[in-house]
Amino acid sequence: MVTAMTGRGLRILALVALALALAGGGLAAMALAWPDQPDPGLPDPQAGRRFQSVLAQLLLRDTGLSSRQDPLVLTAADVNAFLAGHVEVRDPPVWPVRVRIEANGVELGGATTLGRLVVAGLGSGLGQALPGLVRDHPVWVAATGQIVVGGGRAEFLVHAGMIGRQRVPVAVLWRLLGGRPPALAWRMPRVVERVDVEPGRLLIHTRRVRPGGGSPG
């Protein structure tokens, strides 16, 4: 009963949020507007290689073959290049995603359509009733959070959601996307102690391990 009530409550919240976005004048403009985005510039051909170099260094430290403990650095360009060239996600709600790294956390953002949000959050019946131009209208969706590490796993914990330029509760964001994507949790070498966020980059801190002994835990 509690689960049913929770699901119904989230559905109502999603309906309210979408109704406001569609009929709320200023809110509609914010929700359907494309957010300001800095010019990414020309792709850096070395970005993907830098990401792979960091992965290789993590494996060396995890197996005790490297005693280095200086933080490993990944920029947003490095992460985006790796995602574009080496990652495939099965049936994602939003793909491709673009990563921005700001002082308040990591932002994952990408484009979907208004019709997909309606179908995922409110059901296929209402989605099919939308006119084609409305159903296919592009909508920018973003989630901002922190990367938490522990027990050989990493998880992206979201604390803020955005649709267009309109902030929405995280529970509503997941409802409109059809649930929290499982890809937001992944395996991480146990040597990783924490991941700090600085504007424009991630700092990956590792713990010391015994040579040839692997990381503790």
Image (cartoon, rainbow, N blue to C red):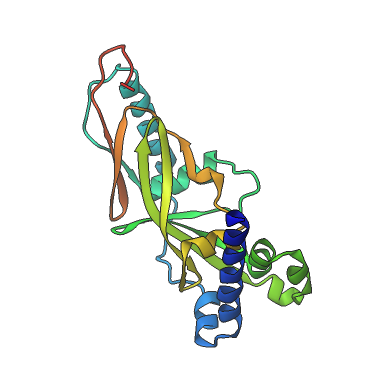
Answer with the quarter of the image where residue 58 lies. top left
Residue 55 sits above or below residue 74 on the image: above
Disc tally is 0
Tell whether 135 sits left or right of 205: right
Residue 19 sits above or below residue 151 on the image: below
Q: Residue furthest front?
A: 1
Q: Residue at x 21, y 33 (%)?
A: 70
Residue 67 sits above or below residue 2 on the image: above
| Quadrant showing the N terminus | bottom right
* Image spot of residue 128 (x, y percent): 78, 69
Q: Nearer the viewer, residue 124 or 3?
A: 3
Q: Residue furthest bottom?
A: 25
Q: Nearer the viewer, residue 83 or 64?
A: 64
Q: Nearer the viewer, residue 143 or 10?
A: 10
Q: Residue furthest top?
A: 212
Q: Is residue 133 visible?
A: yes
Q: Is residue 41 visible?
A: no
* Image spot of residue 75 (x, y percent): 34, 47
Q: Residue at x 69, y 76 (%)?
A: 134
* Image spot of residue 185 (x, y percent): 48, 41
Q: Residue at x 57, y 60 (%)?
A: 6
Q: Residue at x 36, y 38 (%)?
A: 149
| Quadrant showing the C terminus | top left
Answer with the quarter of the image where residue 116 lies. bottom right
Tell whether 185 sits left or right of 104: right
* Image spot of residue 84 (x, y percent): 53, 46
Tell whether 106 sits left or right of 173: left
